[in-house]
């Protein structure tokens, strides 16, 4: 089982950005947490982060050619704006779980829209970093 974890804009700033919302742990801490969990489950995990919409589209397309079995994606602010990321996920048709660290359902109106949600198997919202682990479990059927 090969899983690609994709993070969008400003998620590289975890630990620095709005710690009251996203916590004090860093992006590196997040990768370590996911890697250890995936190793324990015998899952091959790879990571991609970018602040650029097109680079995220490229990474999703590449997942098809790399025969990735599942995608865990937190598109950050592009969640609420990006038809291009939606179309990329539709194009590759790889089972995908949407993750948000914060509880977007209780935040601003503009965060209530997710362009990718209709093509995702599930959305894990407001579970902090553990949400990524929950997403892996869903992909594994656990
Ligand atoms: C986020 C929520 C988005 O609204 C925001 O733009 C982010 C992070 C989350 O993980 O809670 O960058 O996706």
Image: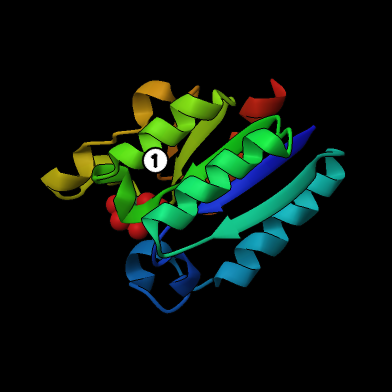
Classify residue 71 by image quadrant.
Answer: top right
Binning the other alpha carbons within 10 Å of mark 1 as few (below 14), some (14 to 19) or many (20 upward) gives: many
Residue drawn at 41 percent across, 65 percent down: 51
Residue drawn at 76 percent across, 37 percent down: 2
Residue drawn at 87 percent across, 39 percent down: 42
* CB of mark 1 near ligand 1 (< 8 Å): no
Q: Is residue 60 visible?
A: yes
- Give the image quadrant in which the ligand numbered 1 is located: bottom left
Q: Is residue 136 visible?
A: no
Q: What is the x, y in percent for residue 126?
A: 40, 45
Q: Nearer the viewer, residue 49 or 107?
A: 49
> Tag 1, which secondary structure?
helix
Considering the image in quadrants, where does the C terminus appear? top right
Classify residue 25 by image quadrant.
Answer: bottom right
Instruction: Tell me the colour scheme of the image.
Output: rainbow
Query: Which residue matches tag 1?
Result: 85
Give the left or right position of residue 54, taking residue 18 as reference.
Answer: right
Q: What is the x, y in percent for residue 41?
A: 83, 38
Q: Residue furthest bottom?
A: 16
Q: Residue furthest left?
A: 109
Q: What is the x, y in percent for residue 37?
A: 76, 48
Give the left or right position of residue 133, taking residue 13 as reference.
Answer: right
Q: Nearer the viewer, residue 16 or 95?
A: 95
Q: What is the x, y in percent for residue 117?
A: 36, 29
Considering the image in quadrants, where does the N terminus appear? top right
Give the left or right position of residue 40, taking residue 60 as reference.
Answer: right
Say above or below: 71 vs 32. Answer: above
- How many numbered tags mark residues here? 1
Residue drawn at 46 percent across, 46 percent down: 57
């Amino acid at each position: 089982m090969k899983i690609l974890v994709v993070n969008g804009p400003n998620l590289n700033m975890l630990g620095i950005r709005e710690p009251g919302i996203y916590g004090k742990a860093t992006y590196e801490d997040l990768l370590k947490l996911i890697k250890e969990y995936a190793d324990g489950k015998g899952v091959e995990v790879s990571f991609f982060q970018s602040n650029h919409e097109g680079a995220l589209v490229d990474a999703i397309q590449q997942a098809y050619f790399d025969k990735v079995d599942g995608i865990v994606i937190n598109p950050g602010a592009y969640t609420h704006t990006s038809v291009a990321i939606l179309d990329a996920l539709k194009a590759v048709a790889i089972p995908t779980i949407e993750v948000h660290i914060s509880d977007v359902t209780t935040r601003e109106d503009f965060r209530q829209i997710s362009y990718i949600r209709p093509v995702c198997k599930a959305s894990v919202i407001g579970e902090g970093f553990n949400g990524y682990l929950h997403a892996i479990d869903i992909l594994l059927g656990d």
